[in-house]
């Protein structure tokens, strides 16, 4: 068993053979992070010519002169292999991550595995390696998954009546939905995002973040821009990422002046149908929150209108790799 140099095709093939392989661990996501100026490491453990384990690690700045190593929706363990092979592969990855951490002078290694909260085997593994839980999450802790194996009638049946009604209402109003790769349409998405963030009082990423993401993930066949129009106006837009049998709704924005046309409902349902017709198994609404007083309460109600299964991830785990810096980190960011 040894560390080896990865290739793009082998990297993504490994992820696509893992039940939890996530687009945040894809080769293209690493390229995107590099475009943002973040250092990355693609670590692969090979056993008898086969990939036994792999992980994408990103160096992220926390400000105040500190950084962390982060593996978004990564996993140190490979459940498709024997326990002995899994533990050996994880140990080799962790050893290399600690070496990188020492060289980069970072305080900790953080991971939020693509594993559910009731996966006690995964949780026990990380705790046994010295990881501790952090209640603050970078990725959403809760999400909503639609089963795309259902037929169209089945998808409608699990929706709330109001959602079904609003989809048909948008159609009757003449709202149309289509994909686009036009840079001008992407700018319209950004314009809508600015107005949405001002209205809902949240801080979006800088424009360059979304542009770099689209310019990297769209040619890789992962990200799609969908727009809902009425006559010559763009009413709403969403970005959807497709990877490893799952389509994920990652970003969205709308023009609040035309809410009565119900464009977001038809927009989402069209993207759902497209993913289903491509043979994908799941549509992930990406983030909800069960707390009715949470800022996402309205967005959560909208997403739940489509039905699906509510899930909870295991959450964020972190490992101190420099006790002194980690103590400082805990003091500054409790």
Image: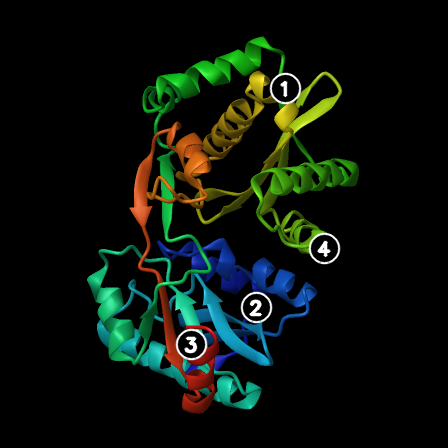
Residue 83 visible in rendering: yes
| SS category of the residue bearing label 1 | strand
Measure the alpha-carbon separation of dots 3 and 1. 49 Å
Q: Residue at x 75, y 20 (%)?
A: 232
Of pointers 3 and 4, the one earlier in the residue sequence:
3
In the displayed structure image, the side of residue 243 where residue 18 appears, left or right:
left
The residue identified by callout 4 is: 208
In the displayed structure image, the side of residue 138 where residue 236 appears, left or right:
right
Which of the pair 15/155 is nearer the observer? 155
Question: In the image, which is nearer the foreground, mark 1 or mark 2?
Answer: 1
Question: In the image, which is nearer the foreground, mark 4 or mark 2?
Answer: 4
| SS category of the residue bearing label 2 | loop
Which of the pair 118/77 is nearer the observer? 118
Of pointers 1 and 2, the one earlier in the residue sequence:
2
- Neighbourhood count class around disc 2 (C-alpha, 10 Å): few under 14, some 14–19, many 20 upward: few
Residue 231 drawn above or below residue 180: above
Could you tell me how many numbered marks the image carries?
A: 4
Q: Residue at x 41, y 79 (%)?
A: 93
The residue identified by callout 2 is: 7
| SS category of the residue bearing label 4 | helix
The residue identified by callout 1 is: 176
Q: Which mark is residue 46?
A: 3
- Neighbourhood count class around disc 3 (C-alpha, 10 Å): few under 14, some 14–19, many 20 upward: some
């Amino acid at each position: 068993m040894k560390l080896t140099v990865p290739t793009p095709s082998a990297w993504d093939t490994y992820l696509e053979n893992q039940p939890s392989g996530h687009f945040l661990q894809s080769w293209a996501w690493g390229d995107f992070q590099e475009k943002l100026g973040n250092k990355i490491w693609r670590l692969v453990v090979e056993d008898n010519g086969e990939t036994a384990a792999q992980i994408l690690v990103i160096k992220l700045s926390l400000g105040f002169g500190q950084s962390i190593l982060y593996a978004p929706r990564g996993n140190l363990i490979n459940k498709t292999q024997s326990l002995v092979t899994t533990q050996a592969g994880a140990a080799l990855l962790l050893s290399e991550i600690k070496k990188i951490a020492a060289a980069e002078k970072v305080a900790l290694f953080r991971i939020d595995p693509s594993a559910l909260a009731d996966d006690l085997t995964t949780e026990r593994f990380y705790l046994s390696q010295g990881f501790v839980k952090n209640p603050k999450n970078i990725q959403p802790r809760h999400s909503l998954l639609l089963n795309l194996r259902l037929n169209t009638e089945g998808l409608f049946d699990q929706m709330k009546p109001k959602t079904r009604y609003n989809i048909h209402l948008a159609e009757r109003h003449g709202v149309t939905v289509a994909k686009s790769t036009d840079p001008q349409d992407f700018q319209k998405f950004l314009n809508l995002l600015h107005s949405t963030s001002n209205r809902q009082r949240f801080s979006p990423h800088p424009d360059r973040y979304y542009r770099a993401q689209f310019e990297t993930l769209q040619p890789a066949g992962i990200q799609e821009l969908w727009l809902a129009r009425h006559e010559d106006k763009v009413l709403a837009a969403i970005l959807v990422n497709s990877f490893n049998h799952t389509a994920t709704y990652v970003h969205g924005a709308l023009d609040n002046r035309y809410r009565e046309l119900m464009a977001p409902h038809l927009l989402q349902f069209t993207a759902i149908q497209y993913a289903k017709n491509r043979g994908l198994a799941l549509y992930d609404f990406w983030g909800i929150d069960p707390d009715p007083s949470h800022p996402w309460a309205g967005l959560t109600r909208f997403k739940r209108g489509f039905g699906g299964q509510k899930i909870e991830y295991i959450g964020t785990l972190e490992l101190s790799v420099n006790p002194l810096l980690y103590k400082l980190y805990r003091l500054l960011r409790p």
